[in-house]
Image (cartoon, rainbow, N blue to C red):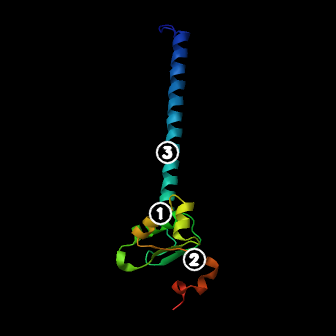
Amino acid sequence: LQGRKKPHLSRVRSKLRKEKLNHTKKTRKKRELEKLQAEVKRAAKLSQAQQYTFFRATEAILCVGEGNFSFAAALAEKMNALRRNPEAGGGVIATCLDDKSTLRDKYTDGKVNVKRIEAAAGAVLYGVDATCLHEREEFAVQ
């Protein structure tokens, strides 16, 4: 060490701090990257799960005991989006126990949801008691 200058303690400390800081930044970036990768995996799984449907677009689905028809409207729109041929049949048949005027009085969004169902090639039936479907002409087995 005779021909060399001895490093000042402050310079050594400064270098050490910089190295620690760089290491900390790299560690943070690595953690952030791992979090992003995990989010991408979750999103991929979610989008994969959304691709599965438990019905065929050409099937008819009966929804009984609807209130404001929001579920049936969402289902009808989903089925209509999946249907390649609008004339292929199928769709949502939504029923409620109330008549039209009672429905409008009870649910402010009921009328809008009924229009959504009908726009998606679905049907709405009023005054249907789900416990007596077998007595209704519309549901007779042919």
Q: Give the numbered dot on residue 1.
A: none
Residue type, numbered disc 3: Leu
Mark 3: few/some/many CA within 10 Å (<14, 14-19, 20+):
few
Residue type at mark 2 is Val
Which residue, given by chain and number where applicable, does mark 1 sit on? 111
State if disc 1 and disc 2 touch (CB < 8 Å).
no
Name the front one of labels 2 and 3. Answer: 2
Q: Secondary structure at mark 3?
A: helix
Q: CA distance from mark 2 to mark 3?
A: 50 Å
Figure check: 124 above or below 12: below
Whether residue 98 is visible here, answered yes or no, is yes
Three-letter amino acid code of the residue under disc 1: Lys
**Side of 125 relative to 133 (left or right):** left
Q: Which residue is mark 2?
A: 128
Instruction: Tell me which numbered mark, 2 or 1, is placed earlier along the sequence.
Output: 1
Judge left or right: residue 140 versus residue 116: right
Q: Position of residue 83 (x, y in %)?
A: 39, 72
Q: Give me the C-alpha separation between circle 1 and circle 3.
A: 43 Å
Q: Residue at image x 54%, y 84%?
A: 139
Q: Nearer the viewer, residue 124 or 8?
A: 124
